[in-house]
Image (cartoon, rainbow, N blue to C red):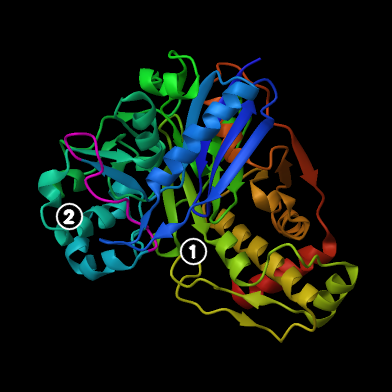
Amino acid sequence: MTRIAVIDIGKTNAKLALVEGETLAEIAVVTRPNRVLPGPPWPHFDLEGHWQFFLHHLSAFHAAHGVDAISVTTHGAAAVLLDGAGELAAPMLDYEFHGPDETAAEYDLLRPDFSQTGSPRLPQGLNLGAQLHWQLSREPGLADRVAHVLTYPQYWGWRLTGERATEMTSLGCHTDLWNPWERRFSALAERLGLGDLLAPPRRSNEVLGQLRPELAAATGLRHDTMVAVGIHDSNASLYPYLRGRDGPLSVVSTGTWIVAMSLGGDAEALDPTRDVLVNVDAFGAPVPSARFMGGREFQLLGGDGTVRPDATARDEVLRAGLMLGPAVIQDSGPFRGRHMAWTEEPASEAARLLAVSWYLALVTRTCLSLTGARGPAIIEGPFARNADFCAMLGSAHPEGVYLASSVTGTSAGAALLCLAEAPRMATRFVPPDPELAAYAMSWQQNFG
């Protein structure tokens, strides 16, 4: 029996999961908040706290169950700067910090066009290139200290193995640094002076290396424990469906971000002004995608799981035609620049949260449409447990919606990087509802 430890760092939480290779089931899971430290020199992530957490639980997992391999998946828009000694040259910037907006005009003169990168211009540090440009121009001496630039999953791989790499799915996540059609760094890398500093790009399912001897001694794992190159989290959700795919389909990866990725779609032209982009899959191929901060919007509007809408709430919403219009978060997504509005004030908390879930599903349907989605859509991640979200998307997407059997598709997808053979991911069909289909059509007429 093969057991893969997966380091899985989303924007909200950091997790270590032990995944059984034969079933892709999670045998054990531990989490900690992915909190942002205030600085100086800027808001940054607690990398050392994560590291100690991972080492402690790798040891515990191995003692209790055995660990045969390690894989890594993380959020995008992130890189780590190392100095010549392999230490941090600077803390890892939080991509939601507005600092990079200070130098936006200068950066816009450097960044390549969407036609070359598939990367839309985004605010804050959501373009990795904008982060790096701002950091290098703001922090005295940083440009001289930086010896290596690693994409985020590969930073953890380097700490585990001592091998340095960047990786295509992370480079292809709206960084401005990658040309997905030519599968090479874009012109921006040289313009930022990083051409010789970016570690070599690798495919996510390659073997990065074996565990450092001192880590094997500290954790009890075998010294020849294999570590995969690692993968961007949304692409981890996509990866299981790349293997043995029959015809076009889309994967909706959910979490802090909801990302719609379309395989075999028919989009004639992608609109970067609507947060549509070209992701890169685990095999290095371009994937039309669109996304918005759906999980964050759900949290902002009180979706904490304590109130569960029932049939009475459904009747209230449908009878009143209660709808939420976009956008709760205005600086990203297909409706960025618009401001949320209710058609009328919800009569109850349950009705409000139901309308919120339906709103998120309908924005997701918009994302699918913008990517030219064809074939069924598969919902991965936490929103696969939100029955109201799933029912609405299942009624709004005409070619059918399925739920992934694994709620945490990121961990399962990352674990698959270590397996030559694995079970096909099971899915469950979501039947459409005529009343919800009518609601979806009305929402589209009002807001779409």
* Residue 138, position as x, y percentages in the image: 17, 62
Q: Residue furthest front?
A: 218
- In this view, 447 is above or below 221: below
User: For the point 16% across and 49% down, which residue is it?
Assistant: 192
Q: For the residues marked 2 and 1, what is the alpha-carbon distance in whole angstroms?
A: 28 Å
Q: What is the chief secondary structure element of the magenta stretch?
A: loop
86 within the magenta span: yes
User: For the point 44% across and 39% down, which residue is it?
Assistant: 52
Please state if 118 lies on the left or on the right of 83 as rendered. right
* Residue 190, position as x, y percentages in the image: 15, 44
Identify the magenta region. Answer: 83-96
- In this view, 22 is above or below 301: above
Q: Which residue is mark 2?
A: 136
What is the quadrant of residue 424 in the picture? top right
Q: Which mark is residue 43?
A: none
What is the quadrant of residue 79 in the picture? top left
Q: Which residue is mark 1?
A: 333
